[in-house]
Amino acid sequence: MWGRLLRAAILIVPAATVVCVVTLLELADISSRQQAANRHPQQQSGHTTEKQDWTTQIAVATDWLDRHREWVNIIFTGFVAVFTGTLWGATKRLAHFAQTQAGDMQDLLRAARDNTTAAASQAEAMKQLHAVSEAQERVMREQAETMAASLALTQKSAEAATKAADIAEKTLISTDRPWVGMDTKLSGRIVVDSGEYRVPVDITLTNYGKSPALSVDYFIELCGSVDTAVIRHHQMINSVQYMTALHSGFVGKTLFPGFPDLHSKRVTASRATIDGEREKAISSEGTDQAGLYIVACAYYRLPGAEFFRHTTAVHQITTPDYDPFIVTADKAVFEIHQSMLVTSRGQMT
């Protein structure tokens, strides 16, 4: 728009300048001719002459303008027409620009209205999301409460299952489990020489239960006093428990009910050891605590179990009134009768 106004000004200003210059030249020419025609022979003062010259020029200019009024009107009317046309064009362009600006403003207002609508929609969406979030939180809280209740029920069920398993195990132990017994009998003569004691025995392992016993085996030792026999008895039980803790010792036989397992064995012990145990017992407790004792322990596993069960026994194979240790010979062989196996005590688990 400003470019168009500048171009119109460039056209109008030179034309107006030309008109003014022509008018001034015409006025100057008329003034000079009038002065030549009306020159007076008398000399006037400089001030009066100058004043008359300006008055004369104004009068001449007025007279020229009056005589050429039509042309002046035509020229100025043309200028006014040109200016009016230029002003009309500029006004039209301004109107178009204003219309364009109004359209842009309408677009801006429409965009602002759309943005406002979108912001309202987003606010509504956020409100709905907040409501959904609260609903989800409420559902999750209810689910957590339900899961806690379910966990409590599961824990109770697990406790009930554990209790039922314990009852089943106890029922199995009391009814269907294997029970391994151990019978120990002298099978020959006791031999005593300067180096050791040798006692021949028959060990019979019998399953009195209703299911097979697994990993069946036994310990057996010879002792010279009650105290030593009790100590060996506890040591054998601890050894069985130690094997359970290490999950070791899963060897041995499988003993079925109704099929006894007979073992013939010669139990030996150092004479120095047995004599030392006897002398210690006699000096502290008397002759009743001294003698010859066999300590035995059979161990086995239940089907499906890892820990071991055991059966123990302590057998006294000499009596106070029959003491082979009074013999001073380097070697003696004593006949052993069944009546010599006078005491037997033990434990079964």
Image (spheres, rainbow, N blue to C red):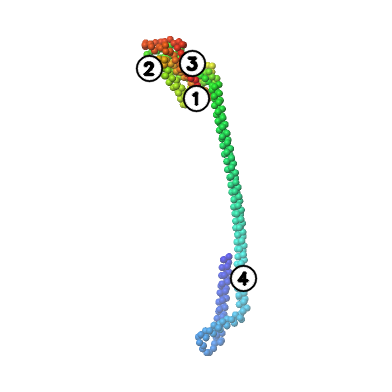
On residue 183, which mark appears? 3
Residue at 55%, 29% in the rendered image: 162
Tell me the quadrant of the picture where the N terminus can be found: bottom right
Q: Quadrant of residue 37?
A: bottom right
Q: Residue furthest front?
A: 285
Q: Nearer the viewer, mark 4 or mark 3?
A: 3
Q: Can residue 150 be seen at all in this image of the molecule? A: yes
Q: Amino acid at mark 4?
A: Thr
Q: CA distance from mark 3 to mark 1?
A: 23 Å
Task: Bin the neighbour count of mark 1 within 10 Å (Cα to Cα): few under 14, some 14-19, many 20 and up.
Answer: some
Mark 1 or mark 4, earlier in chain: 4
Kindly identify the residue that appears in the image at 56 percent across and 72 percent down.
Answer: 13
**Residue 231 image point, x, y percent:** 43, 21
Q: Nearer the viewer, mark 2 or mark 3?
A: 2
Residue underneath mark 1: 307
Tell me if 313 is positioned left or right of 122 in this view: left
Task: Determine the secondary structure under disc 1.
Answer: loop
Q: CA distance from mark 4 to mark 3?
A: 145 Å
Which residue is drawn at the image coordinates 56% and 68% (left, top)?
Answer: 6
Which residue is label 2 attached to? 283
Question: Viewer-proximal residue, 336 or 193?
Answer: 336
| Mark found first going from the N terminus, 2 or 3 | 3
Front disc: 1 or 4 = 1
Q: Which residue is mark 4?
A: 84
Q: What's the amino acid at mark 3?
A: Asp
